Image (cartoon, helix red, strand yellow):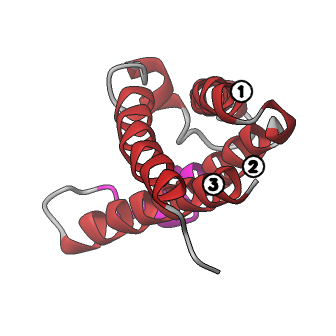
Amino acid sequence: MVIGALDFELFFILLVVYQVKHYIADFPLQKEYMVKNKALEGWAFVRPLAIHCGIHAFLSLLIVMAVNPTLWWLALVDFATHFTMDRIKAGPRYLGRFNDPTTSAFWNCLGFDQMVHHITHYFIILQLALH
């Protein structure tokens, strides 16, 4: 498959837009309540984590609707993968047990988390560029 100049331009613009989206949703819009409570044990983590992932999904939905509204379901993909990855990263029985930022394990877990989020965005961008 040959990518045309317009497709390549759209692809590049979406890469930048998704980087900005990820920064905004993961940092300025992720409040202390979400950061602290998405690591809780039991089911107490669900609400703060769902709010955080809902912000990601909503911003993805805005982007998708601007490019191709028929692919609205990609926002659900963003929600589901973000929810799953963040729970694995924060859950005290999972990677959340490596929560000391002075260790390399913490940074490896954070890097893995960010990589999964970016790969999810690449998948979404690819769907938007191909359809």
At label 3, the amino acid type is Ala
Inspect the magenta stretch and tell me whether residue 68 lies in it: no
Of residues 119 and 66, which is closer to you in this image?
66
Question: Label 1: how many residues lie within 10 Å, few (<14), some (14-19) or many (20+)?
Answer: some
Percent from the top left, x then y, of residue 67? 66, 34
Which image quarter holds the N terminus?
A: bottom right
Percent from the top left, x then y, of residue 127? 70, 57
Would you identify the image quadrant in which residue 99 lies? Answer: bottom left
At label 1, the amino acid type is Met
Would you identify the image quadrant in which residue 120 lies? Answer: bottom right
- Vertical placement of 43 versus 86: above or below? above
Label placed on residue 129: 3
Q: Residue furthest bottom?
A: 1
Q: Which residue is mark 2?
A: 77
Residue drawn at 67 percent across, 54 percent down: 81
Residue drawn at 54 percent across, 60 percent down: 122
At label 2, the amino acid type is Val
Give the CA distance from mark 2 to mark 1: 14 Å
Marked residue nearer the N-terminal end (3 or 1): 1
- Vertical placement of 80 versus 96: above or below? above
State left or right for residue 62 relative to residue 42.
Answer: left
Q: Are marks 2 and 1 in contact (CB under 8 Å)?
A: no
Inspect the magenta stretch and tell me whether residue 98 lies in it: yes
